[in-house]
């Protein structure tokens, strides 16, 4: 885990409840500066990675919408945090903020009250679907990495406890970090952790400042033993050729990744593990930013001959693999899974 010790903490006045004050107390040497809005920060005079390493923001989440997902979870819960220590070159959260340090929202109780009110209004028993057979599932980490946030505020553990005790709801989040402090908590299989995986050499290039793929795979058995439900998240799937022009390079690398997974996991862990698969969507603004900070990654991410453009719901110009070509890629991926790890059910793939 990264040793995150911010030198500057920005905060809004309404974020300084008991939880906000407790976060401040963890970093007594950090400079403090009050801001009017947590999502409109002043010019900090730091580069992309320095902001993520040295700045922490405390805010109050005022818009606590619960959004339908139907994929990773039934619903996306109101954010507990925004931003991440990592600097992944394809991160959609970074697309929407020019300055994007970790922002913790301190009104956790309001967040949980919103979820409770929402789930109580849903039908029960819950209709079985691919998200879960029993519980209504809520993704609690769409805009941050909960593994990092867990050590910054006790609020995350409080949220874990809420879902563990709730008779109708279950939490889920994806992560690129292995925080072994989470192993001290007993989630009673009511918290699903999804380790994001891709071929190791690609991850080293695009998953900037995250834990290695090998470390993530090695942790899966331990998290299952601690009481978590553990899934994997093959995301984003990046299609690429080898240095010699071999167009099957990405297929061969995923085959090796699947074999690593097959070797590492015990039978009882395999039996409960499922996967979600998301092929790469990239963004023009991010492409331009990466040319300055990580141009090598763009050789994999920005491949116009394979991709087509799409205007996102936020008005951004995104690119994704061309429709007919992607259909073939999806079938190839499903075939590789069936050949190498047939025990791994794909919950959804697109």
Image: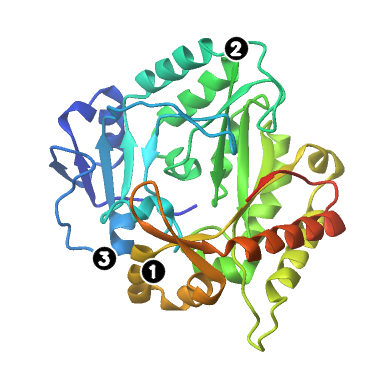
Q: Between residues 122 and 219, which one lies in front from this camera angle?
A: 122
Give the x, y percent position of residue 329: 69, 63
In 3D space, how far apart are the residues under numbered discs 1 and 2 (Cα atoms)? 43 Å
Q: Which of marks 1 and 2 is nearer the N terminus?
A: 2
Task: Look at mark 2 in the image and give the residue it sits on.
Answer: 123
Q: In front: mark 3 or mark 1?
A: 1
- Above or below, 135 against 175 in this view is above
- Above or below, 25 against 247 in this view is above
Is there any visible trace of residue 276 in the rendered image?
yes
Task: Look at mark 3 in the image and give the residue it sits on.
Answer: 47
Mark 1: give few (<14), some (14-19) or many (20+) Cα within 10 Å: many
Residue sitting at x 73%, y 63%: 257
Q: In which quarter of the image is residue 332?
A: bottom right
Residue sitting at x 59%, y 60%: 323
Give the x, y percent position of residue 158: 46, 23
Give the x, y percent position of residue 189: 68, 27
Q: Is residue 342 left or right of residue 215?
A: right
In 3D space, how far apart are the residues under numbered discs 3 and 1 (Cα atoms)? 17 Å
Mark 3: give few (<14), some (14-19) or many (20+) Cα within 10 Å: few
Q: Which of marks 2 and 3 is nearer the N terminus?
A: 3
- Above or below, 17 against 279 in this view is above
Task: Look at mark 1 in the image and give the residue it sits on.
Answer: 287
| SS state under label 1 | helix
Is there any visible trace of residue 3 in the rendered image?
no
In 3D space, how far apart are the residues under numbered discs 2 and 3 (Cα atoms)? 48 Å
Q: Do the residues labelled 1 and 2 touch (CB within 8 Å)?
A: no
Q: Is residue 262 left or right of residue 54?
A: right
Residue sitting at x 26%, y 37%: 58
| SS state under label 2 | loop
Q: In which quarter of the image is residue 166?
A: top right
């Amino acid at each position: 885990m990264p040793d995150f010790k911010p030198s500057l903490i920005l905060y809004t006045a309404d974020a300084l409840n008991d939880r906000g004050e407790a976060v401040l107390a963890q970093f007594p040497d950090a400079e403090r500066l009050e801001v009017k809005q947590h999502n409109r920060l002043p010019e900090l005079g730091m580069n992309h990675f320095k902001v993520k390493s040295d700045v922490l923001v405390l805010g109050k989440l005022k818009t606590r919408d619960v959004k339908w997902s139907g994929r990773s979870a039934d619903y996306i819960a109101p954010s507990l945090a925004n931003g991440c220590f990592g600097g992944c070159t394809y991160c959609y959260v970074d697309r929407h903020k020019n300055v994007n340090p970790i922002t913790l929202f301190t009104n956790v109780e309001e967040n949980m009250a919103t979820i409770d009110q929402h789930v109580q209004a849903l039908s029960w028993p819950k209709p079985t679907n691919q998200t879960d057979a029993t519980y209504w599932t809520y993704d609690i980490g769409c805009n941050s990495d909960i593994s990092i946030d867990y050590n910054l505020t006790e609020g995350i553990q409080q949220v874990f406890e809420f879902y563990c005790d709730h008779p109708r709801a279950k939490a889920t989040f994806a992560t690129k970090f292995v925080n072994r402090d989470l192993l001290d908590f007993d989630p009673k299989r009511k918290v699903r952790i999804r380790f994001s995986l891709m071929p190791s050499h690609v991850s080293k290039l695009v998953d900037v400042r995250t834990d290695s793929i090998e470390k993530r795979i090695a942790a899966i058995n331990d998290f299952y033993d601690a009481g978590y439900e553990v899934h994997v998240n093959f995301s984003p799937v990046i299609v690429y050729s080898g240095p010699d022009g071999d167009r099957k390079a990405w297929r061969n690398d995923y085959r090796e990744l699947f074999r690593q997974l097959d070797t590492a996991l015990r039978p009882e862990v395999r039996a409960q593990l499922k996967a979600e698969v998301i092929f790469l969507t990239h963004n023009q603004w991010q492409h331009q930013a990466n040319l300055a900070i990580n141009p090598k990654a763009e050789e994999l991410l920005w491949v116009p001959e394979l991709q087509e453009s799409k205007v996102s719901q936020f008005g951004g110009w995104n690119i994704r693999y061309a429709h007919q070509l992607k259909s073939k890629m999806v079938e190839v991926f499903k075939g590789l899974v069936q050949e190498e790890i047939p025990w791994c059910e794909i919950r959804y793939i697109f």
